Image (cartoon, rainbow, N blue to C red):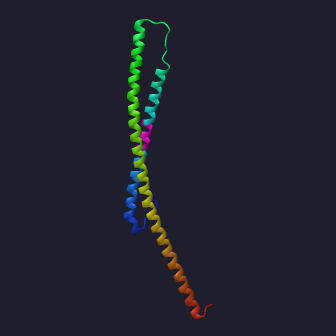
């Protein structure tokens, strides 16, 4: 909204600026939660691939087997925790997306009102100009200046 604002639209233009700031803030928030969700999904994929690619030796010592099982058990716990975090991040992302959509719609509504008001003023100015031109033409015709 860098253009000049008509004096009758100053209040609505202020509302538009506030809506624009809110829309920008909610868009930035959405980008942030999307990045956090992507990082969590990447971590989950990494943990799951660690478990899936765990070697299964044909022969091993008891202590090595216990260590490997303990490592896999911890990785399994991390997978469960990360899945819970991903689920939470999905909810937060959905909420942020809805908030941004709402803020964007509100901003668009105010901008639309401003555009309609400006269009109405332009139409009224064009009508006045046409009426003035008609009046001048009628006066010339009446004086015989055809």
User: Can you give x and y, in whole percent of width and height, for residue 69 in the image?
Assistant: 41, 14
User: Can you give x and y, in whole percent of width and height, for residue 80 in the image?
Assistant: 39, 27
> Furthest-front residue in view?
58
User: What's the residue at 44%, 28% (across, down)?
Assistant: 44
- Queried whether the magenta region covers residue 120, the answer comes back as no
Q: Quadrant of the C terminus?
A: bottom right
- Queried whether the magenta region covers residue 30, the answer comes back as yes
User: Can you give x and y, in whole percent of width and height, for residue 26 in the image?
Assistant: 40, 47
Q: Is residue 25 above or below residue 6?
A: above
User: Can you give x and y, in whole percent of width and height, for residue 87 in the image?
Assistant: 40, 35
In-front residue for pair 110/135: 110
Q: Quadrant of the N terminus?
A: bottom left
In-front residue for pair 26/130: 26
Q: Is residue 100 above or below residue 71?
A: below
Q: Is residue 35 above or below residue 124?
A: above
The answer to whether residue 4 shows anywhere in this view is no
Asked where in the image residue 82 lies, by quadrant, the reply is: top left
User: What's the residue at 39%, 11% (across, down)?
Assistant: 66
Kindly report the secondary structure that dominates the magenta region of the rendered protein. Answer: helix
> Furthest-right residue in view?
146
Count of marks overlaid on the render = 0
State the extent of the magenta-drawn residues as a range: 29-36
User: What's the residue at 40%, 12% (across, down)?
Assistant: 67
């Amino acid at each position: 909204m860098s253009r000049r604002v008509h004096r009758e639209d100053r209040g609505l233009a202020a509302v538009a600026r506030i809506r624009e700031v809110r829309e920008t803030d909610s868009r930035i928030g959405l980008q942030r939660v999307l990045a956090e969700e992507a990082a969590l999904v990447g971590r989950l994929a990494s943990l799951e691939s660690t478990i899936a690619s765990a070697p299964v030796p044909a022969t091993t010592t008891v202590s090595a087997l216990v260590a490997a099982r303990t490592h896999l058990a911890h990785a399994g716990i991390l997978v469960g925790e990360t899945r819970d975090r991903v689920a939470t991040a999905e909810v937060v992302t959905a909420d942020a997306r809805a908030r941004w959509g709402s803020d964007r719609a509100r901003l668009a509504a105010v901008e639309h009102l401003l555009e309609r008001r400006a269009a109405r003023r332009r139409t009224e100015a064009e009508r006045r100009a046409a009426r003035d031109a008609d009046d001048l033409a009628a006066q010339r015709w009446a004086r015989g200046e055809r």
